[in-house]
Amino acid sequence: MTKRTQTRSDAFETPARPTVAALAVALAALALLGAGASLAAAQPDDPAVSVTDAELSQSDTATVDVVLTSAPDGLAGYNLELTVDDPDVARIESASYPDRFDLTTDPEIGESGETVVLEAADMGSTVDAGATDVTLATVEIAGDAPGEAELTVDPQQVDDNEGDRLRPASRAGTLTVTGSGAASGTESAESSSAGPVEELAGSGDGPSLGVVVLLGALAAVGALSAVAVARRRS
């Protein structure tokens, strides 16, 4: 009897130990996840140099902005290089700086308009710590052929007001060049140029539907007139 009672006791107590351990591990994991989520929520968005998208017609121009999404410690100056990955579709025509940058260098555009180097300094400290969406430059793009190309940016050097090097991410812009569309517009105008007289007269050798309906109506009027005259005579 003693052995049977002891055996049953062991059978009930043994599973309880791993169950308690599993609960402890689960609670610890939940605590770590909660702490990680709090840290992730507390971190600000990482700075990035972004290029806006543009859509333009062939043989036309459009402008895009080069933007620093955030400047946690302000902005002292920068040196950037932009590149069009398909210069057969679009090319860089010119570039300019906002007035807030006191010291700038002339934009250095490559011979084929594939690249441009931009460099400027904020001598007046107009970009304060915590600033967002700071426009660094405006670039004019010319469309050469229908298609799509990317305008990538390489932030070679970006310094904050503390004298430290800022290492922002890079976000390319999409350049979409469309055709002129003159041919399709001309074709539509020609197809809809027929007036009411031409539609009534129709085209080809046979009479149009409008002529047939008109002749049928005249025949019906003539038949009704004949019936009325016959009734009067009778």
Image (cartoon, rainbow, N blue to C red):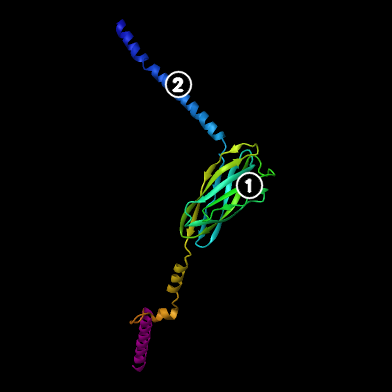
Q: Residues in magenta?
A: 209-234
Mark sitting on residue 24: 2
Instruction: From the top left corner, tell me how far across and down residue 147 is, in percent.
Output: 45, 57
Residue 101 in view of the camera: no
Kind of residue sitting beneath label 2: Ala
Image mark count:
2
Q: Which residue lies furthest to the top in this view?
A: 2
Q: Residue furthest bottom?
A: 233
Please identify the quarter of the rendering in which residue 166 is found: top right
Is 29 on the left or on the right of 203, as rendered? Answer: right
Q: Which residue lies furthest to the front in this view?
A: 111
Would you call the spot at circle 1 few (<14 residues within 10 Å), some (14-19), or many (20 or more)?
many
Instruction: From the top left corner, tell me how far across and down residue 212 is, in percent.
Output: 35, 81
Instruction: From the top left corner, tell me how far across and down residue 66 is, in percent.
Output: 57, 49
SS at mark 1 in the image: strand
- Using the numbered discs, state the Cα–Cα distance from disc 2 to disc 1 in whole angstroms: 57 Å
Residue in the image at 43% along x and 71% along y: 187
User: Is residue 206 shown above or below 50?
Assistant: below
Would you call the spot at circle 2 few (<14 residues within 10 Å), some (14-19), or many (20 or more)?
few
Residue in the image at 58% along x and 44% along y: 69
Q: Name the residue under label 1.
A: 120
SS at mark 2 in the image: helix
Kind of residue sitting beneath label 1: Ala
